[in-house]
Amino acid sequence: MADELSLYEAILEGPGSSQLARLLEGMVTAQVASVLARLGVPDQLAGGPSAADELASGVGAAPDALYRLLTVASAYGLVSRDSAGRYSLTETGELLRSDVPGSARALAVGFLGPPMWEIFGRLTDVVRNPEPVNPAAPGGVYGYYAGHPEQAVWFARAMGRFTAVLVSQLAKAGFQPLTSGRIVDVGGSRGTLLAYLLQAVPTASGVLLDRAEALAEAPGYLSSAGVADRTELVTGDFLREVPPGDLHVLSHVLHNWDDEHVRTIASHCHQAGHPGGGLMVIEYVLPDDAEPSLAHIMDLIMMLVLGGRERTRAQFEALLGPVGYTLVRDTPLTGRLPWRILEFERD
Amino acid sequence: MADELSLYGTLLGEPGGRVGRLLEGMLTCQVASALARLGVPDQLAGGPLTADEIAPRVGAAAGALHRLLAAAAVYGLVSQDSQGRFTLTEDGAVLRSDVDGSFRALAIGFFGPPMWASFGRIADVVQNPEPVNPAGPGGVFEYYAEHPQDAAWFAQGMGQATAVLVAQLAKAGFRPLAGGRIVEVGGSRGTLLSYLLQVVPDATGVLLDRPEALAAAPDYLAAAGAAGRVELVPGDFLRDVPPGDLHVLCHTLHNWDDEHARTIIGNCARASHPGGGLMVIDQLLPDGPEPSLAHLMDLIMMLALGGRERTRAQHEALTGPAGYTLVRDTPVTDVLPWRVLEFERR
């Protein structure tokens, strides 16, 4: 954000200080962008320039406070103001609209709104105190989302954004699974990944296993992807049981859990598999060496939000080997995020 | 922050990367602030250490600390060698306590729990015009009263910001129009008052603040060689202000809404005399719409304290009815858009 204003960079002078100031300023930049999206200001501005007073009544905000927020948003390059006092979206601000290609609104609202902001504020406490994070406990994410379905929808959409990028990377790489037949996506949500796999393997059939609320958008999504007739929806809890199949898929699932739960989930897949059957794990795999990776950022998010973790390939093999799975292929997806596809064969 | 250092920036790709980097701030700020709060950079001052070695010295869990440090490496604050030992980068070294221009106090004080919670409430504040009450339940004052360690970090961060202001005043050779008995209203440890007494050798000083805010003043004033000329007055400027020839309000009015600002200015006017002075130092909002760093400070004031930054005309509208006329406007804007407004009492 070189061409944007930074308050703390101005205060902090000296060698090495500019990067640090911008890292810290993030508290302000993140909230300004997220709240603009949450209030729906960019959607209001989609029709053309508007004054703060008009916007305030459109989004249900106090005019003076909204004016002050918009002025800061202009300092960060999200909106611009003309001489008549009307605000317009910049090219960057456009991305916070709901209905543009590549919209960042769901991410801005789902990953930064409550309860995420409060959870990230606890970073120091979590590092000091090794008590395991329990997402289902009071103040945890699951409890929060159960009580705030609207925020839960934003979060699910933000997650879908990640999966959509993953699937576009798979498509670009022309990825084809080693095993097929009956493909069970364990914790597959609305089925973004399963739809890709069924498209890539026209003879395969699919099973989508998840909690009832996570499957809500699946029927619509699967039929628009043209694979509804090959997919069975199964409501359930993969910590208890997994439906039988030839290939079990765990995409962005294992990183939500500590080692003990990972063994439980993998064992349920094993019980529901057969000799020669497959297990596909897709995660941001931590590098073996000391190189900084975005997987380390995701690891910190997992630590704070869910008490889970990212893992190296060796750590995955150490967890899944004793369950009865042998690694047969490791496909790194190049570009963007450090995803790897680990394909295992059942003994 | 380049693309490859930002998870959300990378995810969104182009053209969304810039939005992603703004949003990533939630993570970057916490990582930098937590490192400073834990005192990790001070431990690394002596050379590379592993997370296992650092953890017991800073009271952290080794596994979680390693994960924090690995994330800090992505953001360029530390680097990791092949033995898993971490070293401070040039950026990370600024978070040490004992370096010139240390940012540790600001990283802890300005981004600690009460500020983080204040920022988490932007949507509520914008949607609900109820005034923020910093002294109310959950407000910053209540938090600092209950957490003296955090209050000390915050005060140290503020003192650092004032020190930057004073350095700018010195560089500009600024001298006040009025002298005599100078009363700094809400003057904390006396950073600014010491400067004013240095440039006006025949002046005397009065430092008014809450007792806890004056705690560091005797030592600071003694070190500045001003102790013999300063009287410390514990008190509440919303009730009463000691008499003097020049009243100084530096980074004070912006903490308050207009009603409280009028009360404070009125208290100064009553403690003054015709020809007496009032000096207001704040970041001034520009008259035009161009974005200014003062707008960022204005948002912080709105959220944390229910206060605001003001234009020069807004300051004049507050001080005029109390009997003050603007006689000089001195911009000190090399670092932040500070202005020194000097008024004379009619």
Image (cartoon, helix red, strand yellow):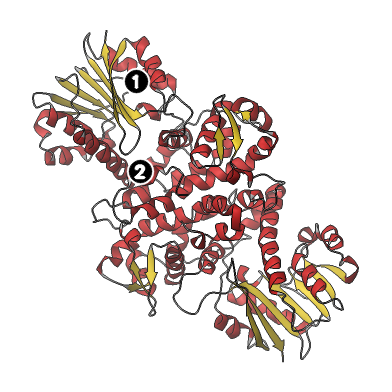
Q: Amino acid at mark 2?
A: Ala
* Residue A83 against residue A144 in the figure, above or below: above
Q: Chain of mark 1?
A: B
The residue at 30%/67% (across/down) is: B44
Counting other residues with Cα less than 10 Å from the Cα at mark 2, is it few (<14), some (14-19), or many (20 or more)? some
Residue A41 percent location from the top left of the image:
64, 37
The residue at 24%/36% (across/down) is: B168
Q: Which mark is residue A10?
A: 2
Viewer-nearest residue: B200 or A214: B200
Q: Which mark is residue B223?
A: none
Residue B326 vs residue B294: left or right? left
Are marks 2 and 1 in one subunit?
Answer: no
Q: Which residue is mark 1?
A: B264
* Residue B95 against residue A55 in the figure, above or below: below
Q: Can I make out residue A164 in this image?
A: yes
Residue B336 percent location from the top left of the image:
34, 37
Label 2 residue SS: helix
Residue B140 percent location from the top left of the image:
43, 39
Q: Quadrant of residue B124 in the image? A: top right
> Which mark is nearer the camera, 2 or 1?
2
Q: Amino acid at mark 1?
A: Ile
Q: Quadrant of residue A11 in the image? A: top left
Q: In the picture, which quadrant includes the C terminus of chain A?
A: bottom right
Q: Can I make out residue A139 in this image?
A: no
Viewer-nearest residue: A142 or A91: A91
Label 1 residue SS: helix
